[in-house]
Image (tube, rainbow, N blue to C red):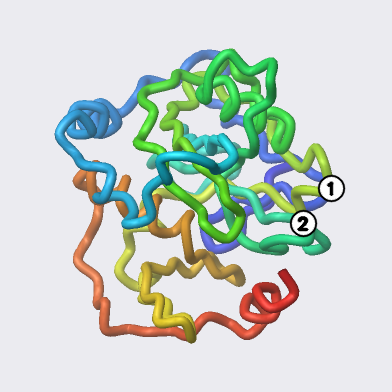
């Protein structure tokens, strides 16, 4: 049974987020705004998504899946959702942070799109056969982990039940309404003692910031879905994330 709080669906550590029964096993038509994103990507420089671009050499190849889809069972809205994970609280790096499903490329992966789909399946149970890959965004660089990350944009045409598949890596799986993400009341700027300032999202009791928040904000803006919000609303990064950084 899908657990919905403040419009956000949660699988919980041992539960699931189920497809809407209204689909009845069929496919959901792709929204026009996703096709618009694919077209606009052709004229967008990588710096649009991040100022941290891959070095000429080095970095570990990886990919994340930015998966939009129809609302799941129990959803309180009729608009599109995006799949996110809450990382395991016991991980050495970035514990409890909100992220896209994803990870390092394996030798058996044909390409980085295959990496994104495989990792999403391993972490959440997403059936790759139900995903339409729309585009691969420019690769970005996560300097602390030395990852070169390829964001893969997809549409979940035929949703499958999702939930935590590997508790060592994933604490929870979320399905978040796009309407929640673009609402001005959920947006703010995040500050870090290092001087970093970036976008943030209020996800009920969770705090979305950093690489994932910046990438998500850019995609929603490129889609023409963003609403004006007050960038003057500033929140410092919670102490728990600063302690994680010191331990790493």
State the separation of the CA atoms marked 2 and 1: 7 Å
Tell me if mark 2 has few (under 14), some (14-19) or many (20+) residues whose alpha carbon lies within 10 angstroms of its own: many
* Res. 222 image quadrant: top left
Q: Is residue 55 left or right of residue 219?
A: right
Query: Could you say where residue 47 lies in the image, as x and y percent from the top left?
Result: 26, 50
* Res. 151 image quadrant: top left
Tell me if mark 1 has few (under 14), some (14-19) or many (20+) residues whose alpha carbon lies within 10 angstroms of its own: some
**Identity of the residue drawn at 26% across and 28% down:** 38
Q: Quadrant of the C terminus?
A: bottom right
Check the image and report above or below for 29 versus 79.
above
**Identity of the residue drawn at 45% across and 31% down:** 152
Q: Nearer the viewer, residue 142 or 120?
A: 142
Q: Nearer the viewer, residue 214 or 11?
A: 214
Q: Quadrant of the N terminus?
A: top right
**Identity of the residue drawn at 42% across and 45% down:** 54
Residue annotated with mark 2: 88
Determine whether label 2 and label 1 are within 8 Å by CB.
Answer: yes
Query: Could you say where residue 138 lies in the image, as x and y percent from the top left?
Result: 35, 36
Q: Secondary structure at mark 1?
A: loop
**Between discs 2 and 1, the one toward the N terminus:** 2
Q: Is residue 167 left or right of residue 119?
A: right
- In the picture, the disc for residue 167 is 1
Query: Could you say where residue 56 lies in the image, as x and y percent from the top left?
Result: 41, 40
Query: Could you say where residue 134 lies in the image, as x and y percent from the top left?
Result: 37, 23
């Amino acid at each position: 049974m899908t657990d919905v709080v403040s419009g956000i669906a949660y699988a919980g550590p041992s539960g699931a987020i189920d497809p809407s029964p209204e689909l009845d096993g069929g496919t959901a038509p792709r929204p026009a705004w996703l096709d618009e994103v694919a077209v606009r990507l052709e004229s967008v420089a990588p710096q649009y998504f991040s100022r941290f671009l891959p070095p000429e050499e080095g970095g570990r190849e990886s990919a994340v899946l930015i998966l939009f889809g129809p609302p799941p069972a129990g959803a309180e809205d009729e608009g599109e959702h995006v799949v996110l994970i809450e990382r395991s609280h016991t991980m050495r790096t970035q514990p409890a942070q909100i992220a896209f499903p994803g990870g390092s490329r394996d030798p058996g992966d044909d390409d980085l799109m295959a990496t994104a789909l495989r990792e999403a399946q391993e972490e959440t149970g997403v059936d790759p056969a139900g995903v339409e890959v729309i585009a691969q965004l420019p690769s970005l660089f996560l300097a602390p982990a030395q990852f070169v990350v390829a964001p893969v944009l997809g549409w979940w045409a035929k949703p499958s039940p999702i939930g935590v598949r590997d508790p060592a890596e994933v604490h929870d799986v979320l399905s978040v309404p796009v309407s929640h993400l673009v609402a001005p009341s959920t947006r703010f700027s995040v500050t870090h003692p290092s001087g970093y300032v970036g976008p943030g999202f209020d996800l009920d009791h969770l705090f979305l910031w950093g690489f994932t928040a910046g990438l998500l904000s850019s995609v929603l803006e490129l889609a023409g879905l963003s609403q004006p919000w007050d960038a003057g609303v500033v929140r410092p990064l919670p102490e728990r994330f600063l302690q994680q950084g010191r331990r790493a």
